[in-house]
Image (cartoon, rainbow, N blue to C red):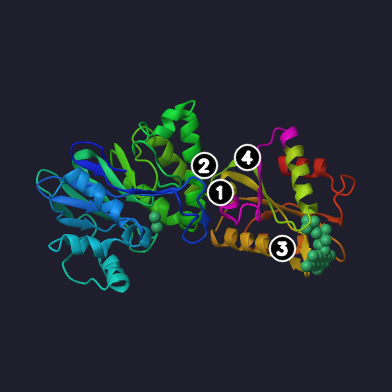
Amino acid sequence: MHSKINDRISYVGVNDLRGRVFEGQWPLPHGVSYNSYLVVDDKVALIDTAAAGFADEFFFNIKAEIGDRKVDYLIVNHMEPDHSALMVPVREKWPDIRIVTNAKAAAMIKEFSGIDTDIILVKEGDTLPLGHCSLSFHMVPMVHWPETMVTWLEDEKTVFSGDAFGCFGAVCGDIRDYQSSLYKASSSFENAFEAFKGEMQRYYADIVGKYGAPVQAALRKLSGLEIKRICPTHGPVWEERIPQVVSLYDRMSRYDADHGVNIVYGSMYGNTAAAAQALSEALTARGIPNEMHDLVAEQGPSFAYAGTFRYDTLAVGSPTYNTDIFPAVRDFMHGVALRGVKGRRFASFGSYTWVGGGNKVLNSLAAEAGLEVLCDGYGFKSGYDPSKFDAAAFADLLANG
Ligand SMILES: Cc1cc2nc3c(=O)[nH]c(=O)nc-3n(C[C@H](O)[C@H](O)[C@H](O)COP(=O)(O)O)c2cc1C
Ligand SMILES: [Fe+2]
Ligand SMILES: [Fe+2]
């Protein structure tokens, strides 16, 4: 997809609608976009490239926007290969091109592609004149890698923000939030924004979630700017919904969450799963927002991490499994600990048949991760039965703390 965002800025990124997973693991039920932008003035700057496998479409898009004009600068904001994979063909196509990036990224460029010539190194606040307008560069380390920077186009009050403010989900029709056909097709603007918002929470929770403090530092840096447009590397260009996406990022990076329960479980024979459903029903009956994640059905923890960032309470279920817990649940708990999730209440549940112990393992993993463990856990022996699993008492505890 390519389009003019305005007289100076064009979108030349690609939609990946066939890829099953992102980073080799995160499911993509709605696809993902790899965004790239041109700033066209006396000189032409290309901001980031795209993922491997999309070269033909990417170069087609650029040609459709600028014809046979050459690209003078390639700005590298972030070296993760979903945005930098096409650097080598870009240099082959425009041999005089200058790569503009910071010293940390330059070292990575050499490591990934062997390129170490024709690089203009920039530091915090440096500018690059393009003719009538100029770009400036601002370091935002760990959002999402150590070399990450954002590019600011003062004349258009536009920030090219890299992965920050990005989300999963291919963008249809038009890259601008208010023009996207996703917005137009949905029954309301709000509904469509809610869909992207969920994919933004999931992108953040899965990929950036560990880096709350650097995201806060980046937000402080951007807070002095009067931003009219955010051009991220994934998902829509934000024009109409800037306050909403900035506030969402601010809340997520502070680990601030709504009151509600994220129910996450693994189950071999359905007994722990049945308890999860009973708990969900009891919470809903009490008016407590909740969502349920079966780690096996969802092929991993991606959606469950998003729920962990959305809600202030985490209820995790696992059968006892070889005196430990179900492997997918252990993996999820490890991911919660790695993400440094703060300010969450926790409770465990699950089935066992001989001595049990799954809840104890879950509680100690939660305590190690810094979560507030509310109770010993709602374990029950063998087959699920409402007489063994007091969903009402469990829901009351989670509702009231
Ligand atoms: C491979 C395997 C290992 C198990 N290990 C234990 C165990 O160490 N301790 C225990 O009390 N139960 C153990 N169990 C029994 C399960 O916890 C029990 O069958 C439980 O009801 C399964 O819950 P589910 O229906 O949610 O999968 C094990 C079961 C299997 C299949
Ligand atoms: Fe990234
Ligand atoms: Fe990315």
Of residue 128 and residue 20, the one placed in the foreground of this image is: 20
Name the amino acid, label 2: Gly
Question: Dividing the image into 4 quarters, which one contains the C terminus?
Answer: top right
Helix, strand or loop for disc 1: helix
> Pointer 1: residues within 10 angstroms few (<14), some, or many (20+)?
many
Name the amino acid, label 1: Ala
Distance from Cα at disc 2 to Cα at disc 3: 27 Å
Residue corresponding to mark 4 = 259
Mark 3 CB within 8 Å of ligand 1:
yes
What is the number of the mark on residue 198? 2
Helix, strand or loop for disc 3: loop
Which sits earlier in the primary sequence, circle 2 or circle 3?
2
What is the number of the mark on residue 306? 1
Q: Is residue 1 magenta?
A: no
Q: Is residue 292 magenta?
A: yes
**Residue 88 picture location, percent across and down:** 25, 65
